[in-house]
Image: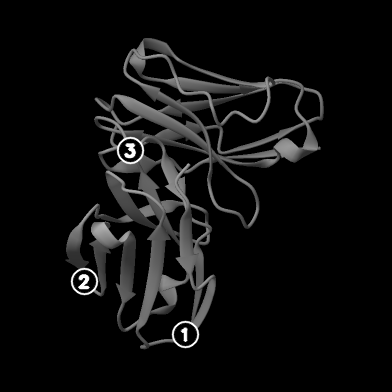
Amino acid sequence: GAGVSQSPSNKVTEKGKDVELRCDPISGHTALYWYRQSLGQGLEFLIYFQGNSAPDKSGLPSDRFSAERTGGSVSTLTIQRTQQEDSAVYLCASTQLGPDTEAFFGQGTRLTVV
Amino acid sequence: GIQVEQSPPDLILQEGANSTLRCNFSDSVNNLQWFHQNPWGQLINLFYIPSGTKQNGRLSATTVATERYSLLYISSSQTTDSGVYFCAVALYALNFGKGTSLLVTP
C-alpha cells in the first residue's frame, strides 16, 4: 500500500482478555518495527522483523506479548491476558531495507484496557 | 542501547518566532530522523538526516555525526507547528528521545 496501515484504530478491551493488533507495511519494505507509546511519553521499542531473519524480541515487556509476521508482509502483535498498564498507543513502522533506511509510521492503534 | 537526549523538553513561542531544537546521542549511528507528532498522534517524517544539512521550507536540520548531535531549526513558526518533535537514531532499531513539546501561540 501507499503507507503503513494499522487496524483497528481504537480498541477497548476488558482486563484479562487477549487482543490482536494488525500492521500492514508499505509494499516492498523488508523491515517492520513495533513500538509502544504511553501517554505523554516517547516511543518504546518492542520488536523488529528483518526479512526472513529471526525477529529481535528484546523490547517485549513480558511473555504476554508476542508478534509474528506472515509471508514477510503483514504483522500481528498479540497481547494475552491484558492488564491496565498495557493501555497505550501501539505504533508500527516499516523501512525499505532495514535500520539504515528511512522509517515510516502508521497511525497507531490506541488500546484501552478497562 | 543508544541514549538520545533532546532539549529543551518544552518550548512556547509566539507565532513568527524562530527556534532551535537539539538532539544529542551517545554513539555512532547509521540513521537519524526527525519526526513531528501532531495533536492527533500521527508521526510525520520531517527529515532523514544521518549527516549533513537539509532544508524543507521553513524547516531545516543539521547533523554533525562526528560530534553526535543534530539540530532542527524552525523559522517563522506557525500555530500548526505545535506538537511534539522527536529525534530518533539507529544502529539497529530506532531509539527515540523523549521529545520537545512545542506550543506556538497566535
Task: Report the chain holding disc 2.
Answer: B
Where residue B45 sits: x, y (%)?
A: 33, 53
Residue tagged 3: A3
Q: Pick whichever of labels 1 and 2 is earlier in the sequence.
A: 1
**Neighbour class for label 2 at 10 Å: few (<14), some, many (≥20)?**
few
Question: Looking at the image, which residue is at 42% across and 34% down?
Answer: A5
Question: Label 2 to label 3, Cα distance in Å?
Answer: 23 Å
User: Is label 3 or label 1 in front?
Assistant: 1
Q: CA distance from mark 3 to mark 1?
A: 32 Å
| As drawn, B16 above or below A41 | below
- Residue B8 against residue A22 in the figure, above or below: below
**Label 2 with label 3: CB-CB less than 8 Å:** no
**Where does label 1 land, which residue?**
B13
Q: Secondary structure at mark 3?
A: loop
Q: Quadrant of residue A2?
A: top left
For badge 1, the amino acid type reads Leu
Q: Amino acid at mark 2?
A: Gly
**Subunit of label 3:** A
Q: Is B66 positioned to the left or the right of B90 in the image?
A: left
| Residue behind mark 2 | B57
Q: Residue at x 37, y 80 (%)?
A: B19
| Number of numbered discs | 3
